[in-house]
Image (tube, grey):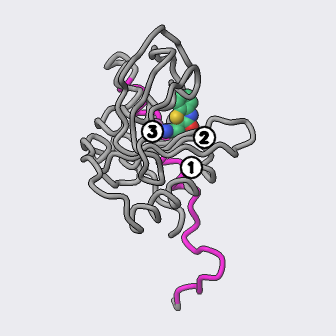
Amino acid sequence: MNKLTILEFPDPRLRTRAKPIEEVDAGLRALIEAMFETMYEAPGIGLAATQVDVHKRLLVTDVSPGRDEPLCLINPEITERDGVIVTEEGCLSVPDIFAKVERSEHIRVRALGGDGQPLDMEANGLLAVCIQHEMDHLEGKLFVDYLSELKRQRIRKQLEKARRHQDDLTPVLKPGDRAPAI
Ligand code: GNR
Ligand code: NI
């Protein structure tokens, strides 16, 4: 499988609530592989299945500086939380927008790993933030939902403008295309 397309705010599909995964089969493993590729190439520190229009409870992360500590969580649940941490968050589905968000600083997570085996882990700091951000995606929630309606409106406008500009710069003919015969 190849790089997947990431949905962008305000795409209504980002509001879908993901369904539990019943079995970890070859198809799911291929999806996990494609999600890692997509996350590393973006680049991002996390990716939820919701963002690639797959509405299953699955997320991938890697918050390590060396980009060599992949973590896949299937049907994740937070069983304990403690402390508060405020982080400047970004999101691949809300490109080039950053805002401070309050999350739990320490969490305990129960899930299945990418191999389908049960897993019980603790996460702190950036990993905890990232897991909570990804789990919000699985509920159809985005970090901009924690901001005021006014700020969200501004972000919507800013993204619309950026997309209009991008359209202006998209060549009508891509390299290798043939010119129309007129
Ligand atoms: O790449 C990402 N960076 C990030 C920074 C702070 C808090 C959360 C994140 S997750 C984000 C990738 C993404 O959009 N995951 O859903
Ligand atoms: Ni995100």
Residue in the foreground of this view, choosing between 132 and 166: 132
Determine whether 166 is above or below 30 in the image.
above
Earlier-in-chain disc, 3 versus 2: 2
The vertical placement of 13 against 31, above or below, is above
Q: Is residue 176 magenta?
A: yes
Q: CA distance from mark 3 to mark 2?
A: 17 Å
Q: Does residue 97 appear in this view? A: no
Query: x%, y% of residue 175?
Result: 65, 76
| Disc 1 residue: CB within 8 Å of ligand 1 | yes
Q: Position of residue 133 (x, y in %)?
A: 44, 30
For label 1, the crowd category at 10 Å Cα-Cα, with few meaning under 14, some 14 to 19 and many 20 or more, is: many
| Residue plotted at (32% across, 32% down) | 141
- The reply to whether residue 67 is visible in this rendering is yes
Residues drawn in magenta: 152-180
**To which residue does mark 1 refer?**
39
The residue at the point 45 percent across, 10 percent down is: 82
Q: Which numbered tag is attached to residue 62?
A: 2
Q: First in sequence, mark 1 or 2: give its number.
A: 1
- Residue 72, percent across and down? 49, 46
Residue type at tag 3: Leu
Front label number (3 vs 2): 3
The amino acid pointed to by label 1 is Met
